[in-house]
Image (cartoon, rainbow, N blue to C red):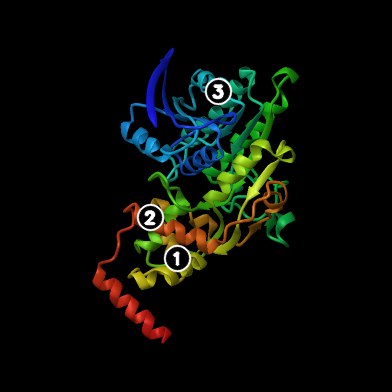
């Protein structure tokens, strides 16, 4: 694989040239993100020519990691500098692309003091990408990464019409007018609505097809070291930085299924003009802890499986900003349908147990979760063998 760098106007480009023929050009925004890295990897495996965006090619460490990720691919990869709030940067990015997968979106680890710091780049960035697509003359379909929280977010009470079944589908929309709505959920809701509104108003000569992918809490192996709150949850359980688990409903999904959903959505005719929930199953956080405990206790890990009283979680949130995101969601159980995922996109959800175990193994392999000392691991294995015997 060879690497070439060039500058087109004011925009820098890095090209990783690999052997083999390729299919259409696909632009993927946010190359280094958890979901985007899996999308790119799968696109390359299918033979697409991929162009993806980073905020700066001067970040040598990030570019190096991406280059290693793409090594051995059978098609060409380009990295282009583009910024969500810089509309002009997207003109070069979408050039000659037939498909666009818009994944990039700001993601907070804590509640931001200024909501606009999250809302503005999420909404304006989405519209900037779509405007460039409309002007390109080549883009035929755009797939955007939305979220289940644009369908329903558990920072709000369950709506009356869903109280009986506690089940949501693609026809449901989160109430964006509720002042208690989590700001990240609001950013995903507003960005998705802005996308549908923008495409609806396009003149016929500039129209393209739009698809929304609405994944649940995304778990799975990491290609890059960037973690979302879902993977962070597994990390905290594995390194026991939390003494107990919250009474929290988790609508989990596998990142590999999410990536495949984006790719299927590019070409499946029936996918166009629709939202698609990508969810494996609805479980409690304790269920995830039990999966981890069963698999990793013999290796010396001690996973907390006791459910913490809600009051304890609330007290913890006074000192731990991450816990503040959890408090409004405590005790709410709900689920999402995944009919379109299976019937339109043709995806059978990965078993939750495999997803969670693969997530933890990835964290260990990358050194994000430290391995227990060998002595502790042997002692834990002996205890397990004695119990089972």
The quarter in which the C terminus is drawn is: bottom left
Label 1 residue SS: loop
Look at mark 2 in the image and give the residue it sits on.
Answer: 363
Give the residue at x 75% y 20%.
204
Label 2 with label 1: CB-CB less than 8 Å: no
Q: Is disc 2 surrounded by few (<14), some (14 to 19) or many (20+) residues within 10 Å?
A: many
Q: Determine whether, in the image, residue 197 is placed left or right of residue 117.
A: right
Residue 304 appears left or right of 100: left
> Which residue, given by chain and number where applicable, does mark 1 sit on?
245
- Looking at the image, the residue that sits furthest to the bottom is 389
- Which residue is outermost to the top? 9
| First reached walking from the N terminus: tag 3 or tag 1 | 3
Residue 297 sits in which quadrant? Answer: bottom left
* Quadrant where the N terminus is found in the figure: top left
Q: What residue do we see at 65% from left, 51% from top?
A: 347
Residue 60 in view here: yes
- Residue 305 visible in the picture: no
Q: Residue at x 56, y 24 (%)?
A: 128
Residue displayed at 40% across by 69% down: 304
Of labels 2 and 1, earlier in sequence is 1
In primary-sequence order, the first of circles 2 and 3 is 3
x%, y% of residue 8?
44, 15
């Amino acid at each position: 694989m060879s690497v070439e760098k060039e500058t087109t106007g004011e925009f820098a480009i890095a090209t990783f040239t690999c052997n083999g023929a390729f299919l259409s050009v696909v632009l993927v925004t946010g190359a280094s993100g958890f979901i985007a890295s899996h999308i790119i990897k799968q696109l390359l495996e299918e033979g697409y020519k991929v162009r993806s965006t980073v905020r700066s090619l001067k970040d040598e460490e990030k570019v190096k990691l991406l280059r290693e990720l793409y090594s051995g691919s059978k098609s060409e990869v380009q990295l282009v500098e583009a910024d969500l709030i810089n509309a002009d940067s997207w003109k070069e990015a979408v050039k000659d692309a037939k498909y666009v997968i818009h994944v990039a979106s700001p993601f907070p680890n804590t509640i931001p003091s200024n909501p606009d710091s999250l809302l503005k780049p999420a909404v304006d960035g989405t519209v900037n990408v779509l405007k460039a697509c409309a002007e390109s003359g080549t883009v035929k379909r755009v797939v955007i990464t939305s979220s289940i929280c644009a369908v329903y977010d558990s920072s709000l009470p369950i709506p009356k019409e869903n109280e009986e079944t506690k089940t949501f589908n693609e026809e449901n929309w989160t109430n964006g007018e509720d002042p208690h709505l989590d700001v990240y959920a609001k950013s995903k809701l507003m960005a998705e609505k802005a996308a549908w509104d923008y495409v609806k108003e396009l003149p016929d000569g500039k129209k393209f097809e739009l698809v929304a992918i609405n994944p649940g809490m995304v778990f799975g192996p990491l290609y890059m070291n960037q973690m979302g709150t879902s993977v962070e949850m597994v990390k905290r359980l594995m390194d026991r930085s939390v003494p107990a688990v919250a009474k929290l409903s988790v609508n989990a999904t596998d990142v590999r299924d999410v990536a495949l959903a984006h790719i299927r959505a590019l070409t499946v005719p029936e996918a166009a003009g629709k939202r698609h929930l990508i969810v494996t199953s609805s479980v409690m956080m304790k269920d995830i802890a039990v999966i981890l405990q069963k698999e990793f206790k013999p290796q010396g890990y001690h996973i907390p499986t006791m459910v913490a009283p809600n009051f304890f979680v609330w007290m913890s949130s006074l000192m731990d900003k991450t816990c503040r995101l959890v408090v409004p969601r405590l005790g709410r159980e709900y689920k999402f349908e995944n009919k379109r995922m299976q019937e339109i996109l043709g995806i059978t959800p990965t078993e939750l147990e495999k997803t969670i175990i693969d997530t933890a193994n990835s964290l260990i392999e990358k050194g994000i979760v430290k391995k227990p000392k060998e002595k502790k691991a042997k002692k834990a294995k002996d205890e397990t063998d004695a119990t089972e015997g």
